[in-house]
Every structure is written in C-alpha cells, then in structure tokens.
Image: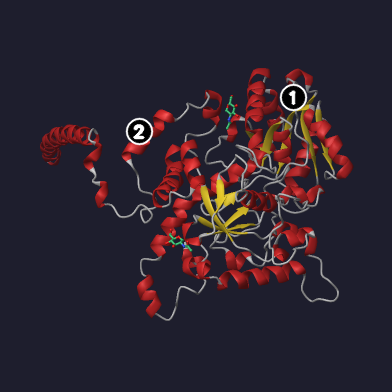
Amino acid sequence: MAERSVSSLGIVSRNFLFCLFVTTSVLFILSWFFVLRSTSRPSFVDHSLLPNSKVLATGGDNGDSATRSENEVEPSIGNRSILVDNDEEEESPRENAKSDVKCNTKDSLALDQQKENKLVLKVFMYDLSPEFHFGLLDWKARGNSVWPDIRTKIPDYPGGLNLQHSIEYWLTLDLLASELPNPPNARSAIRVRNISEADIIFVPFFSSLCYNRYSRTDPHQKKTKNKLLQEKLVKFLTAQKEWKRSGGRDHLIVAHHPNSLLDARTKLWPATFILSDFGRYPPNIANVEKDVIAPYKHVIGSYVDDSSDFDSRPTLLYFQGAIYRKDGGFVRQELYYLLKDEKDVHFAFGSVQKDGIKKATQGMHSSKFCLNIAGDTPSSNRLFDAIASHCVPVIISDEIELPYEDVLDYSQFCIFVRAGDALKEKFLMNLIQSIKKDEWTRMWQKLKEVENFYEFQYPSKEGDAVQMIWQAVARKVPAIRLKLHKSSRFSRSLVHSERGLNSIPSPNNFW
Ligand SMILES: *[C@@H]1O[C@H](CO)[C@@H](O)[C@H](O)[C@H]1NC(C)=O
Ligand SMILES: *[C@@H]1O[C@H](CO)[C@@H](O)[C@H](O)[C@H]1NC(C)=O
C-alpha cells in the first residue's frame, strides 16, 4: 500500500514538473527575444534623465563602448595571454576623465588622455612639510617651497638596500612631474589641485626611509624621529577636512618596508596602503581588498640583451639568502639539508651586501631557476631580482601576495610550490627536473615580456612599475567610492547624534 501511494504521488509530481518545464522554457525564449530587441536600440535609456555625470561616478555609456572597441588596437597575443583582459574595470576611471572634459574644456591634459584612450587617475597630494619627504633625503627647502624643483636637480634617494623600498620616492616624483609644462609621456596619474576633482588623496610621507634612517633612539630624546613623525602625521591627517569627511577611506599611504608606519598604521588603516605584503599586518588593518601590493625595486642589475638559453645557464637552481630564526626560517633550513648535495644546485646563506651583489648577479644570470623562500616576511626582493635576471622564480611562500595579480597570471612565468610539498624528500628536485627546455624557454620569454612592470625610474616610462602601481590604485577607486557612498547614507542623522563622522571608526565594525 505504502509503495503504491508513493509511486502515484511520483506520477503527479512528474506531470507537474513537465508543465513547469514547458512554461519556463517558453518564458525564457520570449524574454531572450525582448532582450535582443531592446539592446539593438541604444536609445533605450534616456540619458537626458540621468543626473550630471560628475555625480554618476561610474555611469556607463552605450555609444562609447562601441567606438572604443573599434579604435582599440588588438594587443599582441603574447601580452594578452599574460595580462587578463580587464576592460570593464578600466572603464570607470576612463569615463571619469571623459566626463571632466565635458565639464571643463580647458583641461587639455585630460583631453589628450581621452585621445590616447588611457586610464588616468586624478590624485590630490598634500603639500606636507618637507620633513616628511624630501627633507629626509637631506634636501633643504628654499623659502616657502615644499617641493624640490625637479627641472633642475632631483634629490637622490640613498642607495644600497634602502632602494628596495623606494616606492614612495618614485610615486611622489611622478606626481610632481605631471605638473611640469611638458610632462613625460607615460601618464597613469596626474596631480590635481582641486581636492573635489580627485579620485584619491596621496600622503607623501617617505615612511620606509624614515624607518630605515631614523628608528634608532637619540640619547637626547625619548622617542625616535620615526615615532615622532608618525605622531605628527596622524595629527595632521585626522585634522584635515577631507579626512574627516571620508574617515580616511579615500587616502593613499605608502608603507612598503614591513616595519614602516608601525605606530600610525593602527590609526590610519581606513586609508589604502601600498605595501610589500601583509605579513606584519592584522587583516582588519590591511588586506588584499583594500590595499595595493607593490614590487620591491630589484637590487640585482637587469639582464640587458640576454641571449642566454636553457643550455647556457649551468646552474639548475639558485638560492642565496639570509637565514632567519623566526617563522619561515624553518623552511629555509630544512630545504638547505634537502638540497645542499644535489647536483647543479647553489644554495648558500648570507644576505646580499654590497660586494655580494656582483656575485649574486652572476649567479642569477647563469641559473635556470631561482628559489624564493619565505623569510621573516612572506615577500622579499629576491623575486624581483629573479625576474630582472630572467631566472624562472620558484616560489615557496604560502602567504605571499604578488603585485598586480588581478591582471597578471604569475603561473605563466613562476613555479609555485607549497611549503609542505617542498619539504617532502625529492619533491622539489623532481618537479624542477621535469621542466624541460621548451617549457623553460616559454617562461623565460614571458619574464622578458613582464620585466618592465617591475622597473622604477624617473622619468617613469610606459608600462613600468610606477605606471602599473597607479593603475592598480585606479582599480581600487570604484570600491572606495562604493564604501564612501554607503557610509554617507545616514550622514544627516550622524550630524545630530553624539558620534560625529570625525571619530575614527573601530577596525572591527568597519568592514
Ligand atoms: C606587448 O607586446 C609588444 C610586442 O610583442 C611589446 O612591444 C609591448 O611592450 C608589450 N606590452 C606589454 C604591456 O607587455
Ligand atoms: C573644484 O571643483 C569643483 C567640482 O568640479 C568645483 O565646483 C569648484 O568650483 C572647484 N574649485 C575651485 C577652487 O576651482
């Protein structure tokens, strides 16, 4: 009995399902028909009803995308396969530049940009006192000037290992250069003087240099200059109208050295940071959604006119680095014991100091693969040394974050190995020996294609690290706007409540 009633129930529901299927299919086909009809008429949306395009920060325009794809030169297949097609995300800042042309035809720079069909970030930069930036390079301001006259002399950033974190310096120089009468051609960001036109507000504090140079205590002072300047910066920023308005969300701060901005980060975290990794940051202070990862400036010289090949690079696997007692040091030590007796493997401890750079350059230029093992932080400049040397990086760092990874597929020119796997007997050697000449040569080719993305220079050139970082920042702008707009929903009630917008939100309930 029970069985029969179950089966009859099954027939009823089967009939019902069939009817439902037929009805939904018909509806689906009909809806397609209407969608096709409506897209064939671009005037479906009446743009005259839309508010001023300035307010509609990311307004789309049907006609525009059509003309754009016509004008766009098809990128070479080589580039395209590495760089993920990111047209949609690039759309909004571009649209933005365009809408400004409409409002302000005097803005000839934006007009040029529109012709070139490029992404341009508008950056407001505070005229911070020189003690926060070029003053740290021992540059002396003349009169009331805050910035050096970069047409005459550009103050040098100190060399050696300081340079690997010099990102702050190159970005600031690039913004200053955008105001020159004949600005350099490469242009992903321009400095704007009107803060309400800006996409983002840049804080020109050379935090890494400040940490490197001034974190030793002066016997006459209780606090280091590094601490004092951070306190001063927090005081300055949180007093600004713009900071209060946004809670700091639309500010951009460079803190590339993992120990830089150590005190201020807990107060300035609503801003977007430019970092080397998140190793020393709790996720509520810095994370991959909010912040931008920038490459280190490589200390090993670029391999110019590299005509080497698989067979002419005698060393199979190269590692030269410091041994750390903390965290990642364990992996390094274990790997050392696994690899030290392998044929064609160079594995040595000792950090790359001045005279060591020449040796390391030779070593990396004559190796097929270069190891990057997490040290006391997930990232290190060794990866960027390997890229500049066209030595295929083998990355053993589970927590590493990579620059521009939203548009760049690193698996095409790097080998990733989980630390757990790398410590298995023979695993690493078997993996690397399985990569034969053809595959290695393909990766070597890609390295030569991408190496420019990691070059810092002044003046900055098309597609170099400075331009790539600005573009990565530009890709954060829509999310920043979204947060800002959401947070202003109840701004009217907030004015009347005890807790004004001035208070710094707590990291825990902000996200
Ligand atoms: C794309 O490829 C072309 C030719 O192969 C090269 O000149 C150009 O620099 C590449 N661009 C990028 C962004 O890699
Ligand atoms: C700054 O830009 C806003 C919006 O474009 C404009 O309303 C304002 O007048 C500008 N201020 C100055 C001083 O030019």
Q: Nearer the viewer, mark 1 or mark 2?
A: 2
Residue corresponding to mark 1: 306
| Mark 2, other Cα within 10 Å: few <14 / some 14–19 / many ≥20 | few
In percent of width and height, residue 256 lies at 67, 53
Q: Is residue 348 left or right of residue 445?
A: right
User: Are discs 1 and 2 less than 8 Å apart at CB?
Assistant: no
Which is nearer the N-term, disc 1 or disc 2? 2
The three-letter amino acid code for the residue at tag 1 is Asp
Left/right placement of residue 346 relative to residue 500 reads: right
392 relative to 501 in the view: left or right: right
| Residue 40 rendering spot, x and y as whole percentages | 23, 32
Query: Can you see residue 500?
Result: yes
On the image, the x and y values in percent for residue 163 come to 76, 48
In the depicted view, which residue is nearer to us: 450 or 193? 193
Q: What element carries label 2?
A: helix
What residue does disc 2 label?
Answer: 66
Dot 2 amino acid type? Ala
Task: Provide the secondary structure element on which disc 1 rests.
Answer: loop
- The quadrant holding residue 280 is bottom right
Residue at the image position 69 percent from the left and 55 percent from the top: 258
| Number of other residues with Cα within 10 Å of mark 1, as a class: few under 14, some 14 to 19, many 20 or more | few
Q: How is the structure coloured here?
A: secondary structure
Find the residue positioned furthest to the right: 355
Q: How far apart are marks 1 and 2 (CA)?
A: 41 Å
Q: Which of 447 and 419 is in front in this view?
A: 447
Q: Quadrant of ligand 1?
A: top right
Q: Quadrant of the N terminus?
A: top left
